[in-house]
Amino acid sequence: MKKIFLFAAAAMVSLSSCVQSEEIYTGGVTEIGFKAAVTRAIISKQEDLKLYPIAVTAIWDNPNDGSSKYNVRFENEKFIYDDGDLKKWRGETAQYWPNGGNMHFLAFSPYPSSAVITNNFNATTGKFETMVISKIDNNILNQHDILFSDLHAVDAPAPAPQPLQFHHALTQVNVEFKITNATADVSLQEVMLMDVVMGGTLTVTPNEGAPSTAEWTLLDNVKDRYFNRSLDASGIEDKALDAALASDKAYSPLPLLILPSAAQTSMKIVYTVDGHREEKIVDLSAFGDWKMGYKYTYKIEINLNQIIFDCTVYPWEDATLDDDGQIIV
């Protein structure tokens, strides 16, 4: 007899607190470089940033060419983070400022090899219409955050590092787990989100002077395009985990990154009590939608009910014997 209480808390991701910038020194006055957000929900090591460049597209308002005033200066150029003597995000192939005009930058990060990025640019108005990013489900599987930037415009040339402000395109799911009212040996085995769509296309609409907006188009509702994402507690020392649980301290594994969706699904919780496997599936639909840029924390509390007995002993009853039980010797 075990009671599982599941609560959900949602909080808007604060970009000011979770986004950091790196200063860039180009060593010259003409090379284009960026001061970009480098936050990743899972990536924590500085050297990992070299593996996941940002993809930048630049539109140039060319004052010297009346026939094609607006044109793409470069498209989906990979900018690599370099933590050498001069920390900077610089082009995989160096990009240089034009002599005059206006430059508009839009970026996506990180740039996985599986991604296909299509920029829809209106050459007449010089406006970005949309940036469409597809085939990025493999990137989500590897647990890297997906970020899209606001549109950044500046007069050229501008040798100072250009700031890129990024927003989170995914939903983050966290789990806190604790046990109360028990001295048993409890071990968390697995927390699994079930039937979650993990593939789709992200369409970013840049807005002049305002944050970009983004929308996911999820893959069709086909069974084989659904699969389970797990928070696996393997590798965690049982003693440390058990001690945390026994002392009513919440244990939180690494967060999951998932696609935003219109309805939350269900969660399977697997744990052991004194070596005996327990499994519980909880419906999450009552908690509402999974929204882009939000993190959700589910607080799982397992309250164990100890088995106890209330014993009653029936009294002796007198038996009836023939001849009143008389024995004559």
Image (spheres, rainbow, N blue to C red):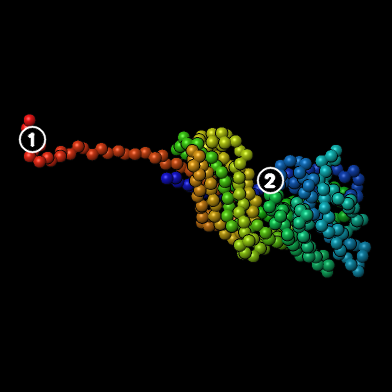
Q: Quadrant of residue 313?
A: top left
Q: Is residue 131 left or right of residue 92?
A: left
Name the residue: 76% across, 57% down. Answer: 115
| Residue situated in front as seen by the camera: 223 or 204 | 223
- Per the image, label 1 sits on a secondary structure element best described as loop
- Counting from the top left corner in percent of width and height, residue 144 is at 70, 49
Q: Quadrant of residue 88?
A: top right
| Residue situated in front as seen by the camera: 254 or 293 | 254
Q: Give amino acid for label 2.
A: Ile
Q: Is residue 188 left or right of residue 146?
A: left
Residue 86 seen in the current view: yes
- Counting from the top left corner in percent of width and height, residue 307 is at 39, 40
| Residue situated in front as seen by the camera: 241 or 154 | 241
Q: Which labelled disc corresponds to residue 42?
A: 2
Q: Residues within 10 Å of mark 2 (few under 14, many from 20)?
A: some
- Per the image, label 2 sits on a secondary structure element best described as loop
Q: Residue furthest top?
A: 329
Name the residue: 55% across, 42% down. Answer: 188
Name the residue: 76% across, 44% down. Answer: 48
Count of labels in the image? 2
> How far apart are labels 1 and 2 at the CA level?
89 Å
Q: Is residue 232 left or right of residue 160?
A: left
- Counting from the top left corner in percent of width and height, residue 231 is at 60, 47
Q: Give amino acid for label 1.
A: Gln
Earlier sequence position, callout 1 versus callout 2: 2
Task: Give the residue pinned by disc 1.
Answer: 326
